[in-house]
Amino acid sequence: MAFWKQLGLLLWKNFTLRIRQPLRLLIELVWPLCLFLILVAVKTRPDLEVFKPECHYDGKAMPSAGLFPFIQTYACTFDNKCHQTVTEDELRGQVDSFNRSLISILIDDIEKVLANNTQRTEIYNIIEDFENLQIIFNKIMNGTSQGEIKLGNLLVNPDKLREQIANQSINLSEESLDLLLNGSISFQKIITNYNLSTGFFDMVARLNESELRESICQEKLLTRWFDFSDPNTANVLDEQLCNLTAVQFQELYDDFMEEYNSSYVYNELRNFYIQNIGKDPNFDLTTIETVQRLSQDITNLDSFQFILDDIQRIQTDLRSGNNTNTSMSENIGLLLCGRKRFNFSIGGGNGNGNSSSPLLNTKPLDPEEKAKSEREYKDSTPFCRNLYMSFENNPVWKFLKPFILGVIPYSPDTPRVREIIKLANRTFLDVSLLINLADDWAGFSPSLYRFLNDDINGLRWFVKSTWCERFEEGSILPTSLGFLDGLLGNLLTTQSRIPKGSCARIGQFISNDADNSGYDWRDALNNTDELIKELKQYMQVITMYILI
């Protein structure tokens, strides 16, 4: 009863108070209603609405995706730009945002080529033979080569040739014929007596029976191609060959071609190789097919032209002489990210969906803080120490510092937990391997320079010749040189042509000319040294320790 009595008294009091104070009652009714109407007006005014777009960020690969995707995504998206639309790599399992970068395409193409009908052992054998051919080339040039290739050794039956010449009454003495058959091919004379660009190869390309006679008589072909035991007798041989009638010279030419065997050429070249290297060559006719298949696999890649275009663009930028940090950053961006925008700097998205604003608002360190930082980073390299100290008062650095210079505390110390920590730290161990790779490159670079400078003169000689151009055209041998068709067969077909312009590009790149205005191997080596040196400095910034 007391409850209801008290409730009645309270209600009577409130109603009596409102009746006696009508103004207060009005205010209590109107004021909340006004506030409600104001809120309704604000919510219904379209000009007061501000639409903020969604913020989508580039996905970042985890260490489990592999070292290269992990470093690539973090380096290329370090500015953490805000996008208004959904990004592809934002979805789960997608980490290939930069699969159109030059280095990604290069890695994919190498995997395709090596996995497609081409065994690694064959490639190793080709490289080994190429190095050995460079050794033979150098021996020929300095006159220390061993062995010889005699013209008579290329014939099936020299005695039958002598009988045919005697039966046809060709005015060529037995002594001169013996001298001709015992003449050995002089590679040194061929290389030194002819213009490396066109002379020798052009002359061989146009040789037939009539051109051959003219070359022997007017250009002293025999003494410029062969070494004879008696040089004086060689002049007599020249005279006898030049005094032959056109019919007799044609018969002599036909007799030689009848006894010629292309397999003997390969055997003689093989023996010459063994005498100078001390082992059998890996090269044979099947190796040519392997090289052709490898070349065809490369040219058939969808990204082959894309790679050439990117290389040309990078070459132009590097050759312009603009070695500023911006230019280097753009080139690194093309190589690593497939774009020139490469914002590898401490910054963050501003959230407006348009751009990113830097957060590097670092205040100068006072003397006490500077001394503290120097003590903390005393074990770091000067580059890393200066970089750390420049970020010391940066809020982003305070967030990243535990990850870059931090530790991994774990417990309990059991074999299973230790195995998990080892897997977690594997990425950073791979980073240390990259640092070791940079150190190895510093020791390897001088050897590579000497090799490219001194040991590929044979390749320079070939790419400057017209025969390299004939490789591009798929017609290395003219129809008149039928005596070489048996050696090469039908290997050099239209399907096995190398890309047009490859000889000119390769020749320019490996050129040793001091006035070479194009991007050459020296520029590539210097830029690679600079790039690896810079990457090593940044890799040394990341140090990860494990704390028990």
Image (cartoon, grey):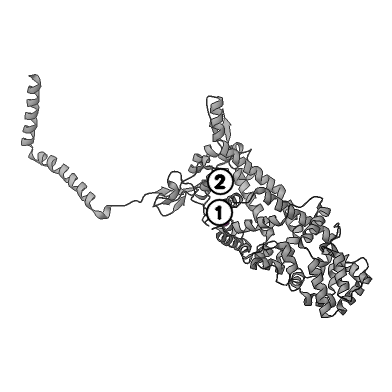
Quick check: can you spot residue 437?
yes
Q: Nearer the viewer, residue 101 or 350?
A: 101
Which residue was labeled with disc 2? 68
Q: Crowding at label 2, few (<14), some or many (≥20) Cα neighbours within 10 Å?
A: some
Q: Is residue 279 above or below residue 186?
A: above
Q: How many marks?
A: 2
> Element type at marker 2?
helix
The residue nearer to you, when weighing 230 against 429, is: 230
Quadrant in which the C terminus appears: top right
Q: Amino acid at mark 2?
A: Phe
Residue 285 position, x and y percent, is 71, 57
CA gap, disc 1 and disc 2: 13 Å
Q: Residues within 10 Å of mark 1 (few under 14, many from 20)?
A: many
Q: Which mark is residue 105?
A: 1
Is 245 colored magenta in this rendering?
A: no
417 up-or-down from 368: above or below:
above
Q: Position of residue 535 (x, y in %)?
A: 61, 48
- Give x and y (percent) for residue 167: 87, 73
Bounds of the magenta span?
Answer: 331-337
> Residue visible at 16% across and 42% down?
32
Please name the predominant secondary structure of the magenta segment in the image. helix
Q: Do we see residue 218 in this rendering?
A: no
Instruction: Point out which mark residue 499 bears.
Output: none
Q: Residue at x 53, y 46 (%)?
A: 69
Disc 1 marks a residue whose amino acid type is: Ile
